[in-house]
Image: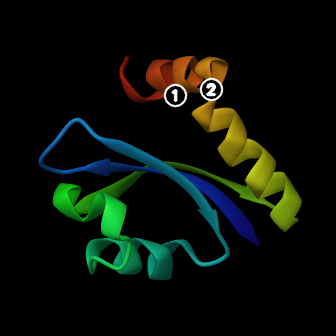
C-alpha cells in the first residue's frame, strides 16, 4: 500500500503534504528532524491520509493536496 498524507505541526498552524509506503515510519522520520525544511515545526501528527494500490496514485493525490482545489478540500475535511 501507498499513502498520500497530511501532517500538522502540534505547535504551529503548519501543514505538510507527502506520500510514502510506510506512514508510521515516515512520521517518525519527520519528527526526528530528517526533513531539514520542516524541522522548525516538529512535532507533527497525521491529520489525514488516503491509501492507494500504486505509487503513482499516491503521488497524484499528493499533488492534488498541494493544488488550490486540494487545499480547499483539505480545509473542509480538517476544519469543520
Q: Is residue 10 above or below residue 30?
A: above
Q: Would you call the spot at circle 2 few (<14 residues within 10 Å), some (14-19), or many (20 or more)?
A: some
Q: Where does the image place residue 22, in percent across and percent down from the top left? A: 59, 78
**Please, which residue is most extreme toward the left here?**
11
Q: Residue at x 32, y 47 (%)?
A: 8
The percent coordinates of residue 15 (x first, y second) are 37, 42
Where's residue 62, x and y in %?
A: 66, 46
The vertical placement of 71 against 49, above or below, is above
Compare residues 62 and 38 and report the one nearer the observer.
38
Q: Indicate how the structure is coloured in the image.
A: rainbow
Q: Residue at x 24, y 50 (%)?
A: 9
Residue shown at 21% from the left, 55% from the top: 41
**Quadrant of the image for the C terminus?**
top left
**Residue lying farthest front?**
37
Q: Is residue 21 left or right of residue 37?
A: right
Question: What residue sits right under mark 2 in the picture?
Answer: 70
Q: Quadrant of residue 64?
A: top right
The residue pinned by badge 1 equals 74
Q: Nearer the viewer, mark 1 or mark 2?
A: 2
Q: Are marks 1 and 2 in contact (CB under 8 Å)?
A: yes
Mark 2 lies on a secondary structure that is helix
Image quarter of residue 58: bottom right
Amino acid at each position: 500500500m501507498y499513502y498520500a498524507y497530511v501532517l500538522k505541526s502540534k505547535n504551529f498552524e503548519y501543514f505538510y503534504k507527502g506520500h510514502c509506503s510506510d506512514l508510521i515510519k515516515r512520521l517518525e522520520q519527520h519528527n526526528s528532524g530528517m526533513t531539514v525544511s520542516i524541522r522548525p515545526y516538529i512535532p507533527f501528527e497525521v491529520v489525514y491520509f488516503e491509501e492507494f494500490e500504486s505509487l503513482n496514485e499516491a503521488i497524484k493525490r499528493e499533488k492534488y493536496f498541494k493544488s488550490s482545489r486540494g487545499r480547499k478540500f483539505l480545509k473542509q475535511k480538517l476544519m469543520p
